[in-house]
């Protein structure tokens, strides 16, 4: 979770600053029976600890999950309809790409040039035209509006990155690697907009210890973005549109040593803790003690390691490369994601989500649709996403890194001309997503919509299919199960199936 404005609530994966200071201080040798509650340790597996079933042959070592909250319009991005009437096509035209016969929106010229590395899916579809982030990001089978702002509801299933983290821990026997497996950029999901409690990327019944490791961002926005709502009076300097070069990513405050504690003193206290652990058979090993130990080990591994700090330090890259990504929060988040997977992170998420009043950075264009697309959203996305793909390729990482770019739904075929700047509203019957690398096809279009991009006419693909295919490429069959808090098994993709159409 990261704070632009200095407010700090909960830190690394839900750990409080008090918890981590206790670890740093080793107060009472770092253990307080009846102290902080355990961070949701995962329940035991119903199969009695056997090796996980359903292991597939992985083609991707890592995944970068790019989520455009609020939902881009398919018409102005990856499914333009140049022959449709003006009230459907809108103010923007289609352009050719490096793939013969494939056209995308004119606002994405740099992506058009790298289309031969991509699989464009035009036939994403589901039944919920609401901000169903948790439905798209998890295996939960159904959704409802009240769940949007209930991230800890027992009805919500674990995030894809949390599932991969859990399964990898079972497979390897390593719960607390020095570099977190599941990292979220640039801050805790939706924590800087007007609705700070959006459901989606959390550990759910696997426990909050499987939440993403949230980074922090230190910096200020430099660009006033076009308004989102007709009645918006605020001038919002959104960091997604521009930041200073000195801005940086960092660990949450609770994942850093207190200023008064030197590295030498910290090491000495860790040694004392190890001595204490060696004598623990003499002590009653209560369940809460074991859980606390698990999270203590994780916190120690993060505090004592420079790998995560080094990977987040985008200032180590050349100014030219940083400019290539764009000196924006989204661009620098994409660059940090590449550095993280290069360092060995397994699942890295880049969330472009609301910032400021009215969710001023979100893609939810119920008004001012075309000014926001032309003067803000499309140029930033075009530059940063294309840079991510070409940079991964130049580092030899694209073939082993799955890159998914998606959102929770699409937007209405017919433009609403009443709001200033036009509008497209929520629409989930047909929308687009883009896949690259990690075993997916290159230069391919999957699926088709009707003449107005309103309904899927060929190869419908659900969010659950996307999840099943992602797990497959990362080495887990869709039949793999995870246990809830009662030990009941749940299929990780809730009925989704691997789509061979997406594979290379």
Image (spheres, grey):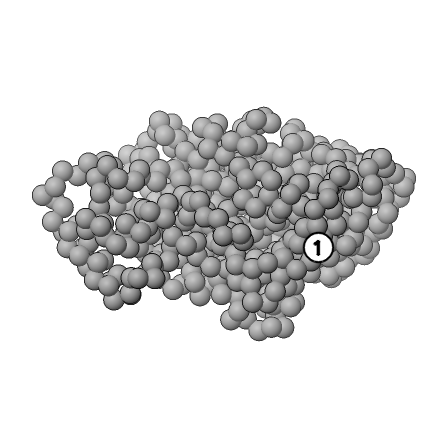
Q: Position of residue 132 (x, y in %)?
A: 60, 34
Residue 482: image quadrant is: top left
Q: Position of residue 405 (x, y in %)?
A: 62, 49
Residue drawn at x 51%, y 31% as measured from the top left: 150
Which is more toward the observer, 103 or 286? Answer: 286
- From the top left corner, tell me how far across and down residue 217 is, in percent: 52, 56
Say above or below: 33 vs 351.
above
- The residue most toward the front is 233
Report the side of 113 relative to 494 (left or right): right
Residue 328 can be seen in this image: no
Residue position for label 1? 224
Q: Is residue 378 above or below residue 364?
A: below
**Residue drawn at x 31%, y 51% as measured from the top left:** 21
Instruction: For mark 1, give the secondary structure.
Output: loop
Total numbered labels placed on residues in the image: 1
Is 371 displayed left or right of 118 in the figure? right
Would you identify the image quadrant in which residue 421 lies?
top right
């Amino acid at each position: 979770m990261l704070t632009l404005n200095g407010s700090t609530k909960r830190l690394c994966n839900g750990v409080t600053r008090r918890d981590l200071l206790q670890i740093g201080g080793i107060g009472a040798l770092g253990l307080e029976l009846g102290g902080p509650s355990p961070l949701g340790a995962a329940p035991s597996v119903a199969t009695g600890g056997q090796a996980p079933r359903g292991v597939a042959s992985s083609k991707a070592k890592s995944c970068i999950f790019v989520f455009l909250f609020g939902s881009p319009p398919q018409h102005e991005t990856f499914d333009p309809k140049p022959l449709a009437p003006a009230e459907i096509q809108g103010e923007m035209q289609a352009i050719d790409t490096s793939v013969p016969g494939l056209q995308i929106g004119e606002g994405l010229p740099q992506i058009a040039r790298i289309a031969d590395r991509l699989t464009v899916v035009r036939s994403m579809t589901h039944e919920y035209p609401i901000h169903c982030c948790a439905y798209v990001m998890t295996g939960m089978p159904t959704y409802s509006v009240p769940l949007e702002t209930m991230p800890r509801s027992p009805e919500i299933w674990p995030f894809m990155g949390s599932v991969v983290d859990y399964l990898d821990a079972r497979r390897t026997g390593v719960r607390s690697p020095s570099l977190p497996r599941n990292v979220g950029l640039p801050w805790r999901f939706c924590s800087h907009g007007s609705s700070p409690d959006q459901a989606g990327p959390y550990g759910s019944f696997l426990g909050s210890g499987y939440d993403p490791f949230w980074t922090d961002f230190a910096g200020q926005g430099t660009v006033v973005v076009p308004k989102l709502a007709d009645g918006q009076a605020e001038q919002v300097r959104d960091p997604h549109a521009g930041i200073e070069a000195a801005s940086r990513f960092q660990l949450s405050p609770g994942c850093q040593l207190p200023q008064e504690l030197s590295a030498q003193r910290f090491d000495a206290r860790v040694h004392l803790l190890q001595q204490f652990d060696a004598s623990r058979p003499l002590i009653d090993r209560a369940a809460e003690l074991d859980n606390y130990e698990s999270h203590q080990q994780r916190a120690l591994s993060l505090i004592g390691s420079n790998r995560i700090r080094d990977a987040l330090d985008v200032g180590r890259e050349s100014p030219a490369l940083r400019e290539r990504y764009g000196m924006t929060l989204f661009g620098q988040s994409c660059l940090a994601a590449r550095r993280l997977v290069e360092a060995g992170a397994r699942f890295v998420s880049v969330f472009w989500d609301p910032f400021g009043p009215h969710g001023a950075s979100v893609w939810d264009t119920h008004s001012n649709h075309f000014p926001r697309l032309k003067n803000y959203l499309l140029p930033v996305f075009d530059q940063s996403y294309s840079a991510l793909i070409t940079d991964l390729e130049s580092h030899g990482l694209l073939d082993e890194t799955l890159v998914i770019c998606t959102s929770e739904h699409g937007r209405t075929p017919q433009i609403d001309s009443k709001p200033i700047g036009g509008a497209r509203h929520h629409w989930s019957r047909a929308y687009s997503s883009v896949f690259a690398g990690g075993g997916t096809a290159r230069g391919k279009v999957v699926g088709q919509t009707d003449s107005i991009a309103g309904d899927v006419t060929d190869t419908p693909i659900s969010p659950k299919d996307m999840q099943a295919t992602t797990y497959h490429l990362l080495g887990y069959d869709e039949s793999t199960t995870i246990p809830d808090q009662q030990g009941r098994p749940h299929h990780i993709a809730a009925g989704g199936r691997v789509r061979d159409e997406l594979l290379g």
